[in-house]
Image: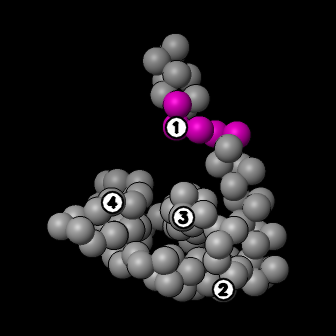
Amino acid sequence: MTTETLLMELETLCEKGGYTIRKERGSFRGDQCIIEGDKLIVINKNKPPESQAAILAKVLKSMSPDDTYIKPAVRKELEKIWARLDRFNDDDITEEIQKS
């Protein structure tokens, strides 16, 4: 599965979960938030598709993905991304930065 196809599938899943996706330019990584009761995912369009997919995968993991039908090929890719995200928790990264 190409990264672009995976990205489209993940966007569709997030939208089915009630999120609005905005792709913007800037000096930010991207994440989810709630603004005035609306669930929003902001993605930096300057980042490579792999990074954008990782943001969406992180959001999907927090949405109880077991309750949602996900195509087997997409789920396989998601599990790979989740495994990588679990290895690099934000807390671990912050601790490494503080040590240096």
At a point 75% along the width and 84% down the height, the residue shown is 71
- Among the two numbered marks 3 and 1 on one chain, the one whose residue lies closer to the N terminus: 3
Q: Residue furthest left?
A: 36
Q: Amino acid at mark 2?
A: Thr
Label 3, label 2: how far apart the Cα atoms are: 21 Å
Q: Which mark is residue 33?
A: 4
Cβ–Cβ below 8 Å for labels 3 and 2? no
Q: Which mark is residue 90?
A: 1
- Among the two numbered marks 1 and 2 on one chain, the one whose residue lies closer to the N terminus: 2
Magenta stretch holds residue 45: no
Which quadrant, please, contains the N terminus? bottom right
- Could you say where residue 24 lies in the image, as x and y percent from the top left? 31, 71
Q: Secondary structure at mark 3?
A: loop
Q: Amino acid at mark 3?
A: Met
Q: Residues within 10 Å of mark 4 (few under 14, many from 20)?
A: some
Tag in front: 3 or 1 = 3
Q: Residue furthest top?
A: 99
- Could you say where residue 67 lies in the image, as x and y percent from the top left? 65, 72
Q: Secondary structure at mark 1?
A: helix
Label 4, label 1: how far apart the Cα atoms are: 17 Å
